[in-house]
Image (cartoon, rainbow, N blue to C red):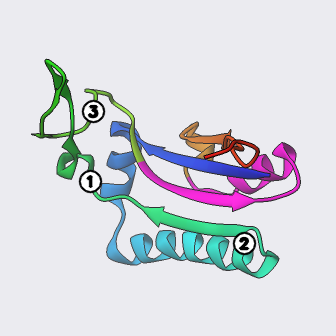
Amino acid sequence: MKYVILIYSNPASREIWDSFSGEQKTAGFAVYAALGEELAASGELIVSEALADSSLTTRIPAQEGQALTTDGPFAELKEQLAGFFLIECESAERATEIAKKVPEAPLGLVEVRPVLDLSGLEM
């Protein structure tokens, strides 16, 4: 089954990150690289990406049935999506085990969500 591991940031986690030295930031990125390599080696990784700062978001809202373009994230939230892992593994328990390895997990900023299986639908 496929799962997405969503990684969020918030003001507290951004403050922690901003306080890191360049060397500490490099080490932090190495944790993600190692997790990606581990998941690739096990065959569980589909894709993983870090997202650019939410201030670079382009929002496509609707007004009177027409799509418009505006700057900024969809909602004014303290927590913003920072990245994700899309994995395929045997169980929700395994997906949760993987998610616990993400550095933001101890801060409560990681979510595991099953991907909706649409394979049985006719398109």
Q: Nearer the viewer, residue 51 or 90?
A: 90
User: Is disc 1 placed on a helix, strand or loop?
Assistant: loop
Q: Nearer the viewer, residue 80 or 17?
A: 80
Distance in Å between CA atoms under marks 2 and 3: 31 Å
**Few, some or many residues within 10 Å of mark 1 (<14, 14–19, 20+):** few
Do tag 2 and tag 3 residues touch (Cβ < 8 Å)?
Answer: no
Q: Nearer the viewer, residue 33 or 84?
A: 84
Let me know if residue 100 appears in the view: no
Of the numbered discs 3 and 1, the one sitting upstream in the chain is 1
Is residue 118 found left or right of 69 in the rendered image?
right
Q: Which residues are magenta?
A: 82-103
Disc number for residue 39: 2
Position in image of residue 75 (x %, y %): 28, 28
Residue in the picture at 72% in, 44% down: 117
Of the numbered discs 2 and 3, the one sitting upstream in the chain is 2
Disc number for residue 74: 3
Residue type, mark 2 in image: Leu
User: Is disc 3 placed on a helix, strand or loop?
Assistant: loop
Q: Which residue is mark 1?
A: 53
Of the numbered discs 2 and 1, the one sitting upstream in the chain is 2
